[in-house]
Image (cartoon, rainbow, N blue to C red):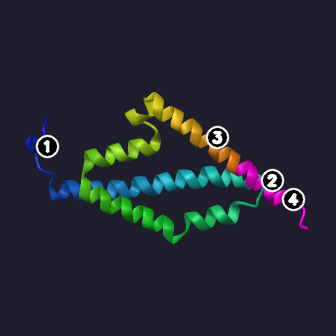
């Protein structure tokens, strides 16, 4: 169906999409916070960082941005955007994207190991 054939999005639909987008962004951040809090609880060193991120202006900006983008782009596009972040978008099934994710994970692991080794060296 061409975009010109679609019915225009009403103001009520935009407001509802904005509200749902804000709640969804907040719940996604909450899930991130809970997972990282559980991982940081083992060492206790990361807890202040995780808490300061979740209760920061940056988190408020993420929720506000999701609200504004949800209002502007509408329901279908917002659903596609969130499906990408949750790993349910069709791009996650493509082989090139999976390879890219593996490269990203390996690079992140290498950076973490280098960072941890750098921090554990005795001061000179």
Q: Residue at x 51, y 55 (%)?
A: 29
C-alpha separation, residue under disc 1 versus residue under disc 2: 54 Å
Give SS at disc 4: loop
The answer to whether residue 64 is left or right of residue 28 is left
The residues colored magenta run 112-124
Q: Which mark is residue 3?
A: 1
Q: Earlier in the sequence, mark 3 or mark 1?
A: 1
Which mark is drawn over residue 117?
2
Contact between marks 4 and 1 (CB within 8 A): the answer is: no
- Secondary structure under tag 3 reads helix
What is the number of the mark on residue 121?
A: 4
| Residue 95 or residue 62, whichever sits in front | 95
State if disc 1 and disc 3 touch (CB < 8 Å): no
Circle 1 packing at 10 Å, graded few (<14), some (14-19), many (20+), is few
Prevailing secondary structure class for the magenta stretch in the rendered image: helix
Q: Nearer the N terminus, badge 1 or badge 2?
A: 1
Residue ID at (56%, 52%): 32
Instruction: Quadrant for residue 11, please give it.
Output: bottom left
Q: Position of residue 19 (x, y in %)?
A: 32, 58
Residue that numbered label 3 is attached to = 106
The span from disc 4 to disc 1 (Cα, nearest Å) is 59 Å
The single residue placed furthest to the front in the displayed view is 124
Comparing labels 4 and 1, the label whose residue is closer to the camera:
4
Q: Earlier in the sequence, mark 3 or mark 4?
A: 3
Q: What crowding class fits label 4: few (fewer than 14 Cα within 10 Å), some (14-19), or many (20 or more)?
A: few
Real-space Cα separation, disc 3 to disc 1, in angstroms: 40 Å
Dot 2 falls on a residue whose secondary structure is helix
Q: Earlier in the sequence, mark 4 or mark 1?
A: 1
Between tags 3 and 1, which lies in front?
A: 3
Where's the N terminus, which quadrant? Answer: top left
């Amino acid at each position: 169906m061409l975009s010109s054939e679609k019915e225009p999005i009403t103001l009520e639909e935009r407001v509802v999409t904005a509200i749902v987008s804000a709640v969804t962004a907040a719940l996604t951040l909450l899930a991130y916070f809970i997972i990282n809090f559980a991982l940081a609880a083992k060492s206790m060193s990361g807890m202040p960082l995780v808490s300061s991120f979740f209760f920061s202006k940056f988190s408020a900006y993420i929720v506000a941005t999701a609200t504004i983008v949800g209002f502007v782009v509408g329901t279908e596009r917002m659903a596609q955007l969130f499906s990408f972040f949750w790993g349910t978008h069709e791009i996650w099934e493509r082989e090139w994207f999976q390879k890219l994710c593996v490269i990203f994970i390996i690079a992140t692991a290498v950076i973490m190991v280098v960072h941890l080794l750098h921090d554990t060296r005795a001061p000179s």
